[in-house]
Amino acid sequence: MALLEIKNLHATVGDREILKGIDLTIQAGEVHAIMGPNGSGKSTLAGVLAGRELYTVTEGEVRLDGKDLLEMAPEERARDGVFLAFQYPVEIPGVSNMYFLKAALNNIRKHRGEEELDAMDFLNLVREKMKLMEMDQTLLNRAVNTGFSGGEKKRNEIFQMAVLEPRLAILDETDSGLDIDALRTVAGGVNALRGPERSMIVVTHYQRLLNYIVPDYVHVLAEGRIVKSGGKELALELEETGYAGFGIFDEEEAVGKV
Amino acid sequence: MTTVSEQIGSWLEEFEQQQRTCPPSLAPLRAAAFARFAEKGFPTTRDEEWRFTNVAPIARRSWRAIQGYRIEGHATATAPADLSDEALKYLGQSASQANPFVALNTALFREVSFYHVPRNTVLEKPIEITYTAEGEGAYHPRVLILVGSNAQCTIVETYTGKGEYFTNAVTEIVVGEGAVVDHYKVTLESPEAFHIATLQATLGRSANFSSHSLSMGGGFVRNDAGATLSEGTEATLNGLYIVNGEQHIDNHTVIDHAKPHANSHEMYKGILDGKASAVFNGRIIVRQDAQKTDSKQTNKNLVLSDDAVIDTKPELQIWADDVKCTHGATIGQLDSEALFYLRSRGIDKQNARSLLTYAFAQDIIDRVKVPALRDSLERILYEKFNELPQ
């Protein structure tokens, strides 16, 4: 059975249809890149999979291990192994990173039938994962994302992913706003988490990230549909010709061309 | 509508009884206070100060003096006849008898919790005063703390109880030159209790005073917290109020910059749920003489239900021309993005809401410098927010 199966997925924001029939099947262990210009629906797809309430699914289905994903609350999805690395990680003043992550991990472990970690074991785990992300340990005691730089926020996302060990990780424009050093670290963290049991959806506008996280498949999204799918070479092709080579324009650019 | 004379009747008997045992040195103050109260009666909502807080449920009732209440702590509960000359000199000098509840307290209190911190003395342990009411009736806790110049102390006042009673408290704190005082008032009254309290601090030159009002209990609560600043004084008034069900809480604060070069900071935060209502009114007076005043006031409210109501109003009266005064008020709900973020990591909706609500209150709790008090407040908050309906 496929880990994730998306069939004819339609979704709206308000009365505007953003996703207009997405079909995508992901097997365990595969990394799929979803590329597309602004406004193509990339982030909407990521949000729908994670259970963001802003979107309404009007048609189609999504199955995780054969289970109806769309029926599940965001926290249930997370406990079943779905992880969204946010494009814009949210600052939560007053909630410490440590407390937050321990609560998250123990909820997920409980759901998996594993024992909850005590403070010591948790700290050991966290230290090891922080090293992987080259993160400053003081970030643990700070409030979630509060006052973090753009790069620290993105690292924190991948760090959380490393601690929570999801089966399906969705990286929503994790490369945006990163300088090349930060990009390498983040990609290194992601690559370290690749494995036969873990699938990933890497959403990005640019090919650059895919030099570091090399996908098994690339899909090009335009106006809410997948218009082309292929191997990793598709990303390079896209880099050469730009989206325009595929007859695709950024929404705002498209308006200009008409 | 209850007439003033009807209201007074039930208190008169108590007053006459108290006057019989009152020393001559105190009798004129009490008589004047009672006359003041008798003249005006309880305020109504036509009175600007009481626009959003209707005390008719208190005024309408004929309260008897409560029999069972306890005073515990370090300040000595002193009967009027035993008050020292020094206590008598300061008693009733800070809190204004123009407030009918203060006048009523002055006329009727049975003892004064009195503490004098001599000058140049640093008290390591907090001065704790706990009032516990049990059963039906009214009582009038009175606190007077004198802090000598360059002394340092912490004061923790706690109000708690069981049953349907009316607490009418007045606290006066006189802080000498250069003294440092941290004051906490914790309101944990019973859900049926009426609680009206006035704090008035008179602050000396270069004194540093902070007061934290932490209101977590009581069915009907009104706090008046006031501070009069001198030259170079630092004053902080912080508050946290948490109301649910049909609770009502009103916080009125007055910071009076009487002299130049003084700073004041004010941060009040409220969490409202159910059909609760809250009022915040923050007055800052900068007198003509008070040049170089720096004053900042913030009131933030987190509203968790559709039926809760908050009225918030800054009131700046500035007569000097070289000052810095800022104020801001916010009323908001839980951040839906933050909720989604927490849920997307496996934390369920209820817990995510509790966590964010707790976080909102946390920054006031973090300012509490007494570890034991901070711990107990954290525990109370934790229990409260885990009870919050979804």
Image: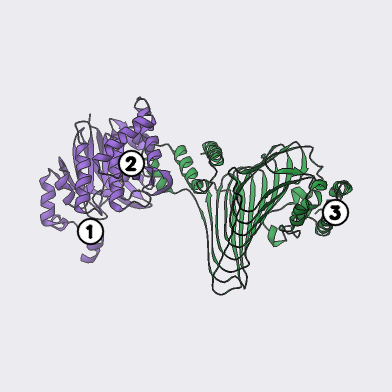
Chain colours: A purple, B green
Tell which of A152 and A23 is nearer to you: A152
Q: Which mark is residue B27?
A: 3
* Image coordinates for residue B366, horizontal then vertical, percent: 50, 46
| Measured Cα–Cα span from mark 3 to mark 2 | 72 Å
Point out the image quarter for the N terminus of chain A. top left
Question: Which residue is label 1 attached to?
Answer: A250
Q: Residues within 10 Å of mark 1 (few under 14, many from 20)?
A: some
Q: Chain of mark 1?
A: A
Tell which of A132 and A168 is nearer to you: A132
Residue B14 vertical placement versus B207 (above, below): above
Q: Residues within 10 Å of mark 2 (few under 14, many from 20)?
A: many
Q: What is the three-letter code of the residue carrying label 2?
A: Ala
Tell which of B107 and A154 is nearer to you: B107
Residue A122 vertical placement versus B14 (above, below): above
Q: Secondary structure at mark 1?
A: loop
Task: Report whether residue A81 is seen.
Answer: no
* Image coordinates for residue B327, horizontal then vertical, percent: 53, 63
Using the rendered view, name the quadrant where residue B205 is placed: bottom right
**Side of B161 relative to A133 (left or right):** right
Q: Chain of mark 2?
A: A
Q: Which is in the foreground here, disc 1 or disc 3?
A: 3
Residue B147 vertical placement versus A71 (above, below): below
Q: Residues within 10 Å of mark 3 (few under 14, many from 20)?
A: some
* Image coordinates for residue A69, horizontal then vertical, percent: 33, 35
Residue depicted at 23% across the width and 66% down the height: A256
Question: Which of pointers 1 and 2 lies earlier in the amino acid sequence?
Answer: 2
Q: Which is in the foreground here, disc 1 or disc 2?
A: 2
Q: Secondary structure at mark 3?
A: helix
**Side of B250 relative to A17 (left or right):** right
Q: What is the three-letter code of the residue carrying label 3?
A: Ala
